[in-house]
Amino acid sequence: MFLQVCGAAREVTGSNYVVEVGKTRFLVDCGMHQGGDKEEALNFAPFPYDPAEIDFVLLTHAHIDHSGRLPRLARAGFSGPVYATPPTCDLAEIMLMDSAYIQEMEAEWRTRKASRAGRRGIEPLYTQDDARKTLRLFRPVEYGKPADLAPGVRVVFHDAGHILGSSFLELRLEDQGEKVKVLFSGDVGQPDQPIIRDPDIVKQTDYLLMESTYGDRLHEHNGTPKAKLASVLKDAKRTGGNVIIPAFAVGRTQELLYFLREIFQENDFDMPVYVDSPLASKASEVYRKHPEAFDEEAWKLVKEGGAFDFPQLQFTHSADESKALNGKRGVVIISASGMADAGRIRHHLKHNLWRPEAHVVIAGFQAQGTLGRRLLDGDKRVRIFGEEIAVKAHIDEITGLSAHADQEQLMAWASNFEPPRLTILVHGELNSALTLERLLEERLHFKVVVAEPNEIIDLDGEVGPSA
């Protein structure tokens, strides 16, 4: 038995792991690499395994850095089932179709550019037809119900508290009489987030594959995220500026709407709020479809009429509706992508970054190389659609809105475990992973390694109880 770390090693995106048990070979996640050109190019590289020999995939959640290369996998020969929670299955449907559309449009644009230069055209990473074929492979598995997927392979999906449907995976593996338990954390959520439940707790595993996205930092706790957002809105209302929020269509947008509804109910001012993302609109419908995954407070709001709906809210769908927002002032615009590296948000930033009265709210992790990261790092000029834009708007970071657990929250989650035989840190930039490695060793006395790209780790069954 072994696992191979094929992605998200010393980087935040591209989650992808191979597990082999006897004659069964399966994947955990198959995500896109995101960031600059170097990271994006990795998506076109061959998989370090034969996709046709993969028996099935376990998907921790629907975010594209965990799911986004599944259509590429199917295009390369994979034809087995993809197991995920019911909300993840529904979210993956809209996210993979949206991703495929973006891949086609990006390839078309690059092909036109290449043709003008006399070069060959560009093929998309995958097509909408590839995505549709992949979606037919999805099979829902409920939280907490053990599923025997192959000889010697049993999985339980536990709530990771990250986004709707997110999970960490408890795997019980057996080969030739050797038994071992392996836990894949996926992305661990913050406790006490609105809408979704806190991460589940498991107390024993032999091997822990753990994310380290915020392993070297803490979320700000000087006031609540809602209070900070309200302060930004009040200042923008006073000056007549727009509030532009790059937000992931799944999770972050719904969380922002939840807070905005409360802010407008509790204060004597309001502003028009536009969600300019067809994907976010569809994702919000999926959230409404799965209130069984909500926490108690959000479930109560659902029964009372809605957790995300309020009079100031409008959804835009067409490109013309999106362009019309460029002429508005004193409004809130929430648009994808969450790292500002693609999608409609770039148009809104182009029309607002140079305005001193405008605010740009950064409300989540920004990977190296993304436009969102450059804004957070204080760049005074950025290039958008080939045009240099002066950055004069207020750049407001609200880290408390992150769907990821921070350093102390990761440590608190890990402290529930008896020390595993080995903890393998993934899904974090190198400094984050190294910092978390030191803390886990010093405080919890874990044996820890920071995974190397394509590293293979033997899963030795002779490691204490795994029943």
Image (cartoon, rainbow, N blue to C red):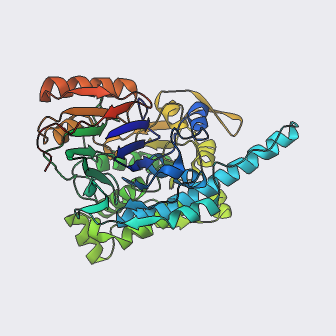
The total of numbered circles placed on residues is: 0
Answer left or right for 370 relative to 283: right
- Residue 442 visible, this orientation: yes
Give how far across and how far down residue 260 sits, in percent.
37, 58
Give how far across and how far down residue 178 sits, in percent.
21, 44
Q: Quadrant of the N terminus?
A: top left
Q: Residue at x 38, y 49 (%)?
A: 23
**Whether residue 153 is situated above or below residue 426 in the rendered picture:** below
Give how far across and how far down residue 149 sits, in percent.
33, 60
Q: Residue at x 72, y 47 (%)?
A: 123
Q: Looking at this view, is 188 or 356 the one in front?
A: 188
**Whether residue 186 is situated above or below residue 372 in the rendered picture:** below
Q: Looking at this view, is 88 or 369 the one in front?
A: 88
Q: Residue at x 40, y 50 (%)?
A: 26
Q: Residue at x 19, y 53 (%)?
A: 200
Give how far across and how far down residue 72 sits, in percent.
58, 51
- Residue 276 visible, this orientation: no
Q: Looking at this view, is 156 or 335 the one in front?
A: 156
Q: Looking at this view, is 118 or 58 the one in front?
A: 58
